[in-house]
Image (cartoon, helix red, strand yellow):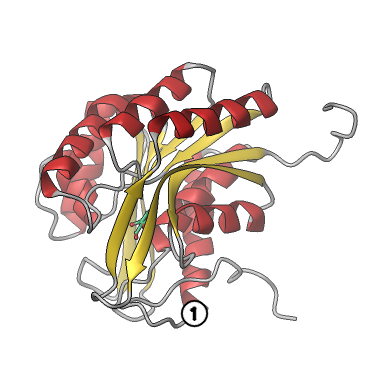
């Protein structure tokens, strides 16, 4: 039973995300990030992605029955009632899933709802993905406090083409103005130039977060880990801008210590900020 040993309780964090079995992305990356940044991570799974090494590492996608997702959320919310106020939303995978998540968001008060708007994932029917994207924009974005679109997702959410930093700023402004949500829009390696540039905009501050690129290839896990790091930092009481800055450092260090793998992308390591032994 709870309550007696809570002097040094870490902040509780929740990810509602897919499993990516190799551990590079999804709930596995989120939980590693939550732990690394000193929070107590919990996870409710929306779907299971298993890459196919015999078919170009295509994504084999299995959704979790929405009732089973609802049960996971019920268990987590009841277990940490009064302590859990920060959640990250990752890959949803279906409209039914989004409905269950929207219900959970409305069933209690949240301080921080970080929406990583994972849109198209290979292995899904394009038609189904379209529905999912629309439901995500209509039902989850309005309930979020921070959203972390990558280049492609920022184009989809803003309806703009993003070719350079000025476009990325405009897109971040537009997404914020339409949703009221703080936006951390990620240029990453997709925009030309020597720096990996992200833009933060919350209606007051427009900040460009740039660091020298580490190579020109995308690294798997960076997007999930960035949003999870923002989530953990918010749970510990940082402001969204502080959380974004800290998350960028976390991911940059992790990309610097990437792990090579047989998949087309290397994978970042969430322990990158640790002091070397
Ligand atoms: O793109 C990020 C992502 C998120 N969640 C899951 C994934 C992936 C990419 O593979 O599999 C479960």
Determine whether 34 is above or below 70 in the image. Answer: below
Looking at this view, is 61 or 169 the one in front?
61
Q: Position of residue 19 (x, y in %)?
A: 45, 53
Answer with left or right where residue 274 lies relative to residue 179.
right
Q: Residue at x 16, y 44 (%)?
A: 156
Looking at this view, is 192 or 231 the one in front?
231
Q: Quadrant of ligand 1?
A: bottom left
Q: Quadrant of the N terminus?
A: top right
Determine the secondary structure under disc 1: loop
Q: Position of residue 269 (x, y in %)?
A: 53, 71
Answer with left or right where residue 213 lies relative to residue 138.
right
Answer with left or right where residue 221 lies relative to residue 125.
right
* Residue, disc 1: 259
Assess disc 1: are there few (<14), some (14-19) or many (≥20) residues with their C-alpha within 10 Å of its C-alpha: some
Looking at this view, is 176 or 144 the one in front?
144
Q: State whether residue 238 appears in this view.
A: no
Q: State whether residue 125 appears in this view.
A: yes
Q: Position of residue 164 (x, y in %)?
A: 16, 60
Answer with left or right where residue 72 lies relative to residue 217.
right
Q: How many numbered marks are there?
A: 1
Q: Residue at x 23, y 57 (%)?
A: 123
Looking at this view, is 37 or 79 the one in front?
79
Q: Quadrant of the C terminus?
A: bottom right
Q: Residue at x 58, y 71 (%)?
A: 272
Q: Position of residue 220 (x, y in %)?
A: 38, 68
Res 246 quadrant in image: bottom right
């Amino acid at each position: 039973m709870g309550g007696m040993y809570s002097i040094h309780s870490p902040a509780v964090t929740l990810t509602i995300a897919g499993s990516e079995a190799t551990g590079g992305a999804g709930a596995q990356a989120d939980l590693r990030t939550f732990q690394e940044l000193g929070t107590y991570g919990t996870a409710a799974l929306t779907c299971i992605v298993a890459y196919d090494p015999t078919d170009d590492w295509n994504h084999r996608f299995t959704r979790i029955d929405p009732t089973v997702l609802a049960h996971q959320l019920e268990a987590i919310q009841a277990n940490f009632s009064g302590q859990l106020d920060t959640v990250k939303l990752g890959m949803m995978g279906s409209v039914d899933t989004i409905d269950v998540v929207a219900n959970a968001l409305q069933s209690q008060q949240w301080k921080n709802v970080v929406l990583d708007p994972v849109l198209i994932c290979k292995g899904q029917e394009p038609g189904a993905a379209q529905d999912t994207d629309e439901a995500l924009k209509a039902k989850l974005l309005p309930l979020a406090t921070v959203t972390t679109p990558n280049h492609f997702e920022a184009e989809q959410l803003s309806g703009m083409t993003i070719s350079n930093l000025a476009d990325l700023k405009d897109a971040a402004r537009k997404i914020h103005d339409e949703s009221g949500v703080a936006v951390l829009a990620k240029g990453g390696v997709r925009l030309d130039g020597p720096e990996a540039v992200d833009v933060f905009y919350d209606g007051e501050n427009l900040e460009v977060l740039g660091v020298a690129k580490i190579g020109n290839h995308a690294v798997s896990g960076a997007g999930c880990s960035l949003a999870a790091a923002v989530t953990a930092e918010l749970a510990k009481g940082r402001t969204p801008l502080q959380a974004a800055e800290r998350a960028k450092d976390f991911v940059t260090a992790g990309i610097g210590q990437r792990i090579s793998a047989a998949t087309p992308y290397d994978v970042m390591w969430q322990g990158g900020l640790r002091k070397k032994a």
